[in-house]
Image: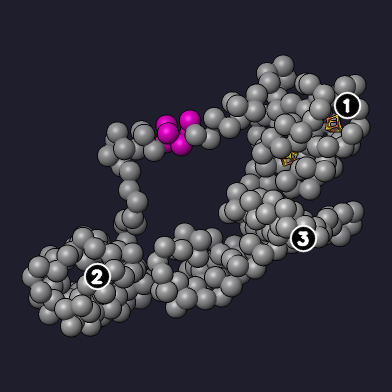
Amino acid sequence: MGTIQTLLNKLAQKLKIKQIKPHGKVDKILRYVKYILLFLILFITYKAHELILRPYDPWAVFMHLGSGSEIFEEFLIGFIILIAIFLSSMFIERAWCRYLCPLGATLALLAPLSIFKVRRSDSKCVDCRACTRNCSMGLNVHSQEIASKTECISCGECISRCPVDNTLEMKKGSIVLSLNKMAAMPLVILVIVVGSNIALGTFKTSSSNVEVLNENGVLNDDNIKGYMTIKDVATEFSIDTNIILEKASLPKDTDINKPLKELKNDLLDKGIEFETEDLKEVVKELIKQSY
Ligand code: SF4
Ligand code: SF4
Protein backbone atom coordinates (compact mmCIF):
# COMPACT_ATOMS: atom_id res chain seq x y z
CA MET A 1 0.00 0.00 0.00
CA GLY A 2 2.92 2.31 0.71
CA THR A 3 4.30 1.72 -2.77
CA ILE A 4 0.93 2.39 -4.42
CA GLN A 5 0.56 5.61 -2.43
CA THR A 6 4.04 6.78 -3.47
CA LEU A 7 3.36 5.96 -7.13
CA LEU A 8 0.01 7.78 -7.03
CA ASN A 9 1.67 10.78 -5.42
CA LYS A 10 4.34 10.86 -8.14
CA LEU A 11 1.56 10.67 -10.75
CA ALA A 12 -0.32 13.51 -9.02
CA GLN A 13 2.82 15.65 -9.05
CA LYS A 14 3.27 14.94 -12.77
CA LEU A 15 -0.35 16.01 -13.28
CA LYS A 16 0.49 19.20 -11.35
CA ILE A 17 -2.04 18.43 -8.60
CA LYS A 18 -1.39 20.86 -5.76
CA GLN A 19 0.32 19.10 -2.84
CA ILE A 20 -0.65 19.70 0.78
CA LYS A 21 2.24 19.67 3.25
CA PRO A 22 0.98 19.79 6.84
CA HIS A 23 3.71 21.12 9.09
CA GLY A 24 4.34 22.38 12.59
CA LYS A 25 1.64 21.74 15.17
CA VAL A 26 -0.94 20.48 12.65
CA ASP A 27 1.47 17.80 11.42
CA LYS A 28 2.40 16.86 14.98
CA ILE A 29 -1.22 16.50 16.11
CA LEU A 30 -2.20 14.52 12.98
CA ARG A 31 0.64 12.06 13.61
CA TYR A 32 -0.94 11.13 16.94
CA VAL A 33 -4.18 10.03 15.26
CA LYS A 34 -2.74 6.65 14.22
CA TYR A 35 -1.79 5.85 17.84
CA ILE A 36 -5.33 6.70 18.97
CA LEU A 37 -6.73 4.45 16.24
CA LEU A 38 -4.37 1.63 17.25
CA PHE A 39 -5.49 1.92 20.86
CA LEU A 40 -9.20 2.01 19.89
CA ILE A 41 -8.86 -1.02 17.60
CA LEU A 42 -7.08 -3.06 20.27
CA PHE A 43 -9.58 -1.99 22.93
CA ILE A 44 -12.70 -2.68 20.83
CA THR A 45 -11.34 -6.02 19.61
CA TYR A 46 -10.39 -7.03 23.15
CA LYS A 47 -13.86 -6.14 24.43
CA ALA A 48 -15.71 -7.82 21.57
CA HIS A 49 -13.52 -10.96 21.54
CA GLU A 50 -13.61 -10.88 17.75
CA LEU A 51 -12.47 -8.81 14.80
CA ILE A 52 -15.65 -6.76 14.57
CA LEU A 53 -13.86 -3.94 12.76
CA ARG A 54 -12.81 -6.25 9.94
CA PRO A 55 -15.45 -5.00 7.43
CA TYR A 56 -13.93 -1.51 7.77
CA ASP A 57 -10.34 -2.70 7.47
CA PRO A 58 -8.73 -1.36 4.26
CA TRP A 59 -5.90 -3.87 4.69
CA ALA A 60 -8.37 -6.77 4.61
CA VAL A 61 -9.92 -5.25 1.46
CA PHE A 62 -6.49 -4.87 -0.11
CA MET A 63 -5.81 -8.57 0.51
CA HIS A 64 -9.16 -9.52 -1.07
CA LEU A 65 -9.04 -7.32 -4.15
CA GLY A 66 -8.97 -10.46 -6.30
CA SER A 67 -12.31 -11.70 -5.02
CA GLY A 68 -14.36 -9.66 -7.49
CA SER A 69 -17.81 -8.34 -6.64
CA GLU A 70 -17.92 -10.33 -3.36
CA ILE A 71 -15.71 -7.63 -1.90
CA PHE A 72 -18.63 -5.17 -1.98
CA GLU A 73 -20.83 -7.54 -0.01
CA GLU A 74 -18.30 -8.15 2.74
CA PHE A 75 -16.19 -5.00 2.76
CA LEU A 76 -18.14 -2.12 1.21
CA ILE A 77 -17.07 0.45 3.83
CA GLY A 78 -13.52 -0.88 3.92
CA PHE A 79 -13.40 -0.58 0.12
CA ILE A 80 -14.56 3.05 0.30
CA ILE A 81 -11.86 3.73 2.95
CA LEU A 82 -9.24 2.10 0.70
CA ILE A 83 -10.21 4.32 -2.23
CA ALA A 84 -10.12 7.36 0.10
CA ILE A 85 -6.59 6.35 1.19
CA PHE A 86 -5.38 6.16 -2.39
CA LEU A 87 -7.05 9.45 -3.29
CA SER A 88 -5.61 11.20 -0.23
CA SER A 89 -2.11 10.07 -1.24
CA MET A 90 -2.47 12.18 -4.38
CA PHE A 91 -2.60 15.29 -2.20
CA ILE A 92 -0.41 14.30 0.77
CA GLU A 93 2.38 11.77 0.16
CA ARG A 94 1.67 8.61 2.17
CA ALA A 95 -1.08 10.39 4.13
CA TRP A 96 -2.32 7.01 5.39
CA CYS A 97 1.14 5.88 6.56
CA ARG A 98 1.91 9.21 8.20
CA TYR A 99 -1.34 9.88 10.01
CA LEU A 100 -3.78 6.98 10.14
CA CYS A 101 -2.24 3.52 9.73
CA PRO A 102 -2.47 1.51 12.99
CA LEU A 103 0.13 -0.91 11.66
CA GLY A 104 2.40 2.09 11.03
CA ALA A 105 1.80 3.12 14.65
CA THR A 106 2.80 -0.36 15.85
CA LEU A 107 5.96 -0.29 13.75
CA ALA A 108 6.73 3.26 14.94
CA LEU A 109 6.54 2.05 18.54
CA LEU A 110 9.03 -0.70 17.71
CA ALA A 111 11.29 1.54 15.58
CA PRO A 112 13.49 2.76 18.47
CA LEU A 113 14.72 -0.85 18.70
CA SER A 114 16.03 -0.83 15.13
CA ILE A 115 19.77 -1.30 14.89
CA PHE A 116 20.44 0.91 11.86
CA LYS A 117 19.14 4.47 11.70
CA VAL A 118 19.45 7.31 9.19
CA ARG A 119 22.12 9.64 10.60
CA ARG A 120 23.17 13.07 9.38
CA SER A 121 26.67 14.46 9.69
CA ASP A 122 26.30 18.08 10.78
CA SER A 123 29.83 18.98 9.75
CA LYS A 124 29.33 17.82 6.14
CA CYS A 125 25.72 19.03 5.70
CA VAL A 126 25.34 22.11 3.47
CA ASP A 127 21.73 22.69 4.58
CA CYS A 128 20.29 22.35 1.06
CA ARG A 129 17.22 20.60 2.58
CA ALA A 130 16.85 18.21 -0.37
CA CYS A 131 16.43 15.42 2.21
CA THR A 132 13.52 17.12 3.95
CA ARG A 133 11.85 18.13 0.69
CA ASN A 134 11.90 14.53 -0.52
CA CYS A 135 11.26 12.61 2.70
CA SER A 136 8.39 10.16 2.07
CA MET A 137 7.20 10.63 5.65
CA GLY A 138 7.48 14.43 5.72
CA LEU A 139 10.24 14.48 8.35
CA ASN A 140 12.60 17.39 9.00
CA VAL A 141 15.70 15.37 8.15
CA HIS A 142 17.97 18.41 7.62
CA SER A 143 17.66 19.55 11.23
CA GLN A 144 18.15 16.25 13.05
CA GLU A 145 21.16 14.13 13.80
CA ILE A 146 19.04 10.97 13.60
CA ALA A 147 16.24 11.26 11.01
CA SER A 148 13.57 10.06 13.42
CA LYS A 149 13.53 7.43 16.09
CA THR A 150 9.93 6.52 15.32
CA GLU A 151 8.46 7.77 12.05
CA CYS A 152 11.31 7.00 9.61
CA ILE A 153 10.43 4.03 7.38
CA SER A 154 14.02 3.55 6.16
CA CYS A 155 13.07 4.11 2.53
CA GLY A 156 16.46 5.70 1.80
CA GLU A 157 14.96 8.47 -0.35
CA CYS A 158 16.76 11.19 1.64
CA ILE A 159 20.11 9.38 1.32
CA SER A 160 19.77 9.09 -2.44
CA ARG A 161 18.83 12.79 -2.74
CA CYS A 162 21.62 14.20 -0.60
CA PRO A 163 24.17 15.93 -2.85
CA VAL A 164 27.09 15.58 -0.43
CA ASP A 165 28.67 12.13 -0.16
CA ASN A 166 28.52 10.35 3.19
CA THR A 167 26.43 13.09 4.83
CA LEU A 168 23.30 11.03 5.28
CA GLU A 169 23.93 7.38 6.01
CA MET A 170 22.05 4.39 7.34
CA LYS A 171 24.44 3.34 10.03
CA LYS A 172 25.17 1.86 13.41
CA GLY A 173 28.46 3.05 14.89
CA SER A 174 31.02 2.72 12.13
CA ILE A 175 28.99 0.17 10.15
CA VAL A 176 27.29 1.79 7.15
CA LEU A 177 24.52 0.09 5.20
CA SER A 178 24.59 1.08 1.51
CA LEU A 179 21.33 1.75 -0.34
CA ASN A 180 21.81 -1.49 -2.31
CA LYS A 181 22.19 -3.49 0.88
CA MET A 182 19.12 -1.75 2.36
CA ALA A 183 17.10 -2.75 -0.70
CA ALA A 184 18.44 -6.30 -0.73
CA MET A 185 17.84 -6.98 2.95
CA PRO A 186 14.03 -7.42 2.90
CA LEU A 187 14.35 -9.66 -0.15
CA VAL A 188 16.96 -11.82 1.57
CA ILE A 189 14.79 -12.08 4.70
CA LEU A 190 11.75 -12.97 2.57
CA VAL A 191 13.66 -15.67 0.69
CA ILE A 192 15.05 -17.12 3.95
CA VAL A 193 11.66 -17.17 5.72
CA VAL A 194 9.63 -18.50 2.78
CA GLY A 195 12.43 -20.83 1.63
CA SER A 196 12.94 -22.41 5.04
CA ASN A 197 9.18 -22.91 5.45
CA ILE A 198 8.92 -24.54 2.02
CA ALA A 199 11.88 -26.78 2.90
CA LEU A 200 10.25 -27.76 6.21
CA GLY A 201 6.86 -28.30 4.55
CA THR A 202 5.22 -25.68 6.76
CA PHE A 203 4.53 -23.09 4.06
CA LYS A 204 0.78 -22.47 3.71
CA THR A 205 -1.22 -19.90 1.81
CA SER A 206 -4.59 -20.70 3.38
CA SER A 207 -5.89 -20.69 6.91
CA SER A 208 -5.54 -23.65 9.22
CA ASN A 209 -6.53 -24.71 12.71
CA VAL A 210 -10.08 -23.47 12.30
CA GLU A 211 -12.13 -23.60 15.48
CA VAL A 212 -15.07 -25.79 14.48
CA LEU A 213 -17.28 -24.62 17.33
CA ASN A 214 -17.27 -21.28 19.04
CA GLU A 215 -17.27 -20.86 22.83
CA ASN A 216 -21.07 -21.30 22.94
CA GLY A 217 -20.86 -24.63 21.14
CA VAL A 218 -22.29 -23.11 17.93
CA LEU A 219 -20.67 -23.84 14.59
CA ASN A 220 -18.16 -21.19 13.60
CA ASP A 221 -19.38 -20.96 10.01
CA ASP A 222 -17.62 -17.62 9.70
CA ASN A 223 -14.59 -19.74 9.00
CA ILE A 224 -16.02 -20.85 5.65
CA LYS A 225 -14.93 -18.23 3.14
CA GLY A 226 -15.36 -17.77 -0.60
CA TYR A 227 -11.62 -18.25 -1.18
CA MET A 228 -11.77 -21.75 0.34
CA THR A 229 -12.36 -24.91 -1.67
CA ILE A 230 -14.71 -27.77 -0.74
CA LYS A 231 -11.56 -29.76 0.02
CA ASP A 232 -10.33 -27.02 2.40
CA VAL A 233 -13.67 -27.00 4.20
CA ALA A 234 -13.73 -30.81 4.37
CA THR A 235 -10.22 -30.82 5.85
CA GLU A 236 -10.87 -28.00 8.31
CA PHE A 237 -14.09 -29.56 9.59
CA SER A 238 -12.87 -33.18 9.27
CA ILE A 239 -15.68 -34.23 6.96
CA ASP A 240 -15.34 -36.53 3.96
CA THR A 241 -15.62 -34.54 0.69
CA ASN A 242 -17.98 -37.17 -0.77
CA ILE A 243 -20.34 -36.73 2.17
CA ILE A 244 -20.34 -32.95 1.61
CA LEU A 245 -21.06 -33.41 -2.11
CA GLU A 246 -23.87 -35.87 -1.38
CA LYS A 247 -25.46 -33.71 1.31
CA ALA A 248 -25.21 -30.62 -0.90
CA SER A 249 -26.69 -32.55 -3.85
CA LEU A 250 -23.68 -31.62 -5.95
CA PRO A 251 -22.47 -33.81 -8.86
CA LYS A 252 -19.69 -36.28 -8.01
CA ASP A 253 -17.38 -34.64 -10.57
CA THR A 254 -17.63 -31.22 -8.85
CA ASP A 255 -14.19 -29.61 -8.73
CA ILE A 256 -13.43 -29.80 -4.99
CA ASN A 257 -10.18 -27.89 -5.51
CA LYS A 258 -11.80 -24.75 -6.89
CA PRO A 259 -12.43 -21.74 -4.62
CA LEU A 260 -16.14 -21.55 -3.74
CA LYS A 261 -16.54 -18.10 -5.28
CA GLU A 262 -15.36 -19.49 -8.66
CA LEU A 263 -17.08 -22.84 -8.30
CA LYS A 264 -20.46 -21.12 -7.98
CA ASN A 265 -20.16 -19.81 -11.57
CA ASP A 266 -19.16 -23.27 -12.91
CA LEU A 267 -22.16 -24.80 -11.17
CA LEU A 268 -24.45 -22.04 -12.43
CA ASP A 269 -23.41 -22.95 -15.99
CA LYS A 270 -24.73 -26.44 -15.21
CA GLY A 271 -27.96 -24.96 -13.87
CA ILE A 272 -27.06 -25.54 -10.21
CA GLU A 273 -27.32 -22.66 -7.77
CA PHE A 274 -24.78 -23.10 -5.00
CA GLU A 275 -23.32 -20.33 -2.83
CA THR A 276 -20.82 -20.26 0.02
CA GLU A 277 -23.82 -19.77 2.34
CA ASP A 278 -25.28 -23.11 1.11
CA LEU A 279 -22.08 -24.91 2.04
CA LYS A 280 -22.23 -23.34 5.50
CA GLU A 281 -25.73 -24.80 5.95
CA VAL A 282 -24.57 -28.22 4.76
CA VAL A 283 -21.59 -28.23 7.13
CA LYS A 284 -23.79 -27.02 9.98
CA GLU A 285 -26.19 -29.89 9.35
CA LEU A 286 -23.37 -32.47 9.17
CA ILE A 287 -21.68 -31.18 12.30
CA LYS A 288 -25.02 -31.24 14.16
CA GLN A 289 -25.44 -34.89 13.23
CA SER A 290 -22.00 -35.82 14.49
CA TYR A 291 -22.19 -34.04 17.87
S1 SF4 B 1 14.73 7.09 5.08
FE1 SF4 B 1 14.87 9.30 4.87
S2 SF4 B 1 13.30 9.81 3.35
FE2 SF4 B 1 12.82 7.77 4.10
S3 SF4 B 1 11.41 8.13 5.80
FE3 SF4 B 1 13.46 8.00 6.70
S4 SF4 B 1 14.13 10.11 6.80
FE4 SF4 B 1 12.40 10.08 5.38
S1 SF4 C 1 20.31 16.73 1.64
FE1 SF4 C 1 22.25 16.32 2.67
S2 SF4 C 1 23.34 18.27 2.55
FE2 SF4 C 1 21.20 18.73 2.08
S3 SF4 C 1 20.32 19.29 4.07
FE3 SF4 C 1 19.99 17.11 3.83
S4 SF4 C 1 21.73 16.15 4.83
FE4 SF4 C 1 22.27 18.29 4.50
Q: Which residues are magenta?
A: 188-193
Main secondary structure found in the magenta portion: helix
Q: Earlier in the sequence, mark 2 or mark 1?
A: 1
Q: Residue 102 versus residue 152: which sits nearer the camera?
A: 152
Q: CA distance from mark 3 to mark 2?
A: 44 Å
> Which numbered tag is attached to residue 17?
3
* Ligand 1 under 8 Å from disc 2 Cβ: no
In the image, what residue occupies the spot 42% across and 34% down? 191
Q: CA distance from mark 3 to mark 1?
A: 31 Å
Is residue 276 shown in magenta? no
Residue 130 location, x and y as percent?
83, 37
Residue 276 location, x and y as percent?
29, 75
Q: Mark 1 sits on what residue?
A: 125
Q: Earlier in the sequence, mark 3 or mark 1?
A: 3
In the image, what residue occupies the spot 70% across and 28% down? 170
Q: Mark 2 sits on what residue?
A: 263
Q: Earlier in the sequence, mark 3 or mark 2?
A: 3
The answer to whether marks 3 and 2 mark residues whose Cβ atoms lie closer than 8 Å is no
Q: CA distance from mark 2 to mark 1?
A: 61 Å
Residue type at tag 3: Ile
**Badge 3 density bin: few <14, some 14–19, many ≥20, Cα 10 Å:** few
In the image, what residue occupies the spot 22% across and 72% down? 266
Compared to 16, does 261 lie above or below? below
Q: Nearer the viewer, mark 3 or mark 2?
A: 3
Q: Residue 255 versus residue 240: which sits nearer the camera?
A: 255
Asked if one can make out residue 38 in the rendered structure from this viewpoint, the answer is no
